[in-house]
Amino acid sequence: MIIRPRRLRRNKAVRAMTCETRLSASMFVYPMFVKEGRGIEEEIPAMPGQRRFSADRLPYAVERVVSAGVNAVLLFGLPEKKDFLGSEAYNDDGVIPKALNELKRHFPELLCITDVCLCEYTDHGHCGCPRGEDGYVDNDATLPLLAKAALSHARAGADIVAPSDMMDGRVEAIRAALDEGGHVDTAVMSYSVKYASAFYGPFREAAGSTPAFGDRRTYQMDPRNRREALREIELDVEEGADIVMVKPGLPYLDILSTVKDISPVPVGAYCVSGEYSMIKAASERGWIDERRVVCEAAFSLARAGADIIITYHAPELAGWLSRGEIEF
Ligand SMILES: [Zn+2]
């Protein structure tokens, strides 16, 4: 007898019924850049199709996201003023609290996740405070600032805060500050496994956060390491992370799969700016079919273990899926 796996591939209906991985728009998170000011809606050249919005313009943009079926956004703040300690990151009248006020007023059901870091707010572009003498980012001096930033987001209505700095002990510091401030229901989604990746290139243009000196390799992870990722996950879970994340996505599917095996909490995967822009650039040249490639990439992340997929393609992908425009 010949065993015939092709029986379950012979037509669309049987493939749909027996497919092992399913995607739903409820898994998607759409990252957005919010810029201080009014009436701003500007293109990001390195990320075709993505824009920066001021808080007052944000509801118009989010309307499109929500109507595509995506109900979670991840907000990055771009302040007008930057300084050494990134003080706009924990200003209660800063760009993110303003954005949250707008969004919560227009979309009470929208899940608002905020990126918690200093790099968009510091004049040196690092995710923490560099020491005077050698510029090495001072871990423990950074923790209270991150905690203050998370607390100001929680006060303004953030549902989930997402620390992306990679300082040791920051989940614990943030959890303690939230609890002390009475925000026991604000969840922490930690960028637990964040590699020092060249795939972040277009984001730095979008967020204006390129370090003025040095690089982020003393705090972000070494792309050559795998066991270290497991240690980071264990630590963040112990410190109280409600959700953990792996970033970037596609180049780290092995890490994502291993993290999923050990994590007791939901696992997110961040399909980063470089992944987005590579697909955009190749599809603009007609070299690949954007829809099919984006969909295949999202299925890869889900197959590898992602419960949550953070992607700049979220609204488009949700639309293609719900309208049945992508065939397998
Ligand atoms: Zn940062």
Image: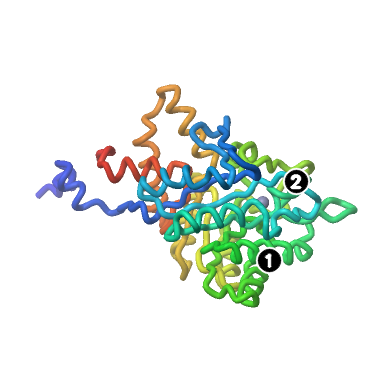
Q: Which of the 4 image quarters holds residue 101? A: bottom right
Residue that numbered label 2 is attached to: 81
Q: Which of the 4 image quarters holds residue 292? A: top left
* Residue furthest left in the image: 1
Q: Which residue lies at the image location 61% right of the left edge and 38% below the top edge?
A: 206
Rendered location of residue 254, percent (x, y): 47, 52
Rendered location of residue 174, percent (x, y): 64, 68
Residue that numbered label 1 is attached to: 147
Element class at badge 2? loop
Rendered location of residue 205, percent (x, y): 64, 36
The C terminus, quarter of image? top left
Q: Nearer the viewer, residue 50 or 81?
A: 81
Q: Which residue lies at the image location 79% right of the left edge and 42% below the top edge?
A: 213
Q: Is 65 positioned to the left or the right of 36 in the image?
A: left
Q: Is 174 positioned to the left or the right of 189 in the image?
A: right
Inspect the image, locate mark 1, and give the three-letter code of the amino acid beneath it: Ala
Q: Which residue lies at the image location 53% right of the left edge and 43% below the top edge?
A: 57
Q: Which of the 4 image quarters holds residue 138? A: bottom right
Quote the CA–CA distance across marks 2 and 1.
Answer: 20 Å
Disc 2 or 1, which lies upstream in sequence?
A: 2
Q: Which residue lies at the image location 90% right of the left edge and 53% below the top edge?
A: 133
Inspect the image, locate mark 2, and give the three-letter code of the amino acid beneath it: Lys
Rendered location of residue 109, percent (x, y): 42, 60
Q: Nearer the viewer, residue 227 or 205?
A: 205
From the image, state whether disc 2 or disc 1 is nearer to you: 2
* Residue furthest right in the image: 133
Is the CB of mark 2 within 8 Å of ligand 1? no
Q: Residues within 10 Å of mark 1 (few under 14, many from 20)?
A: many
Element class at badge 1? helix
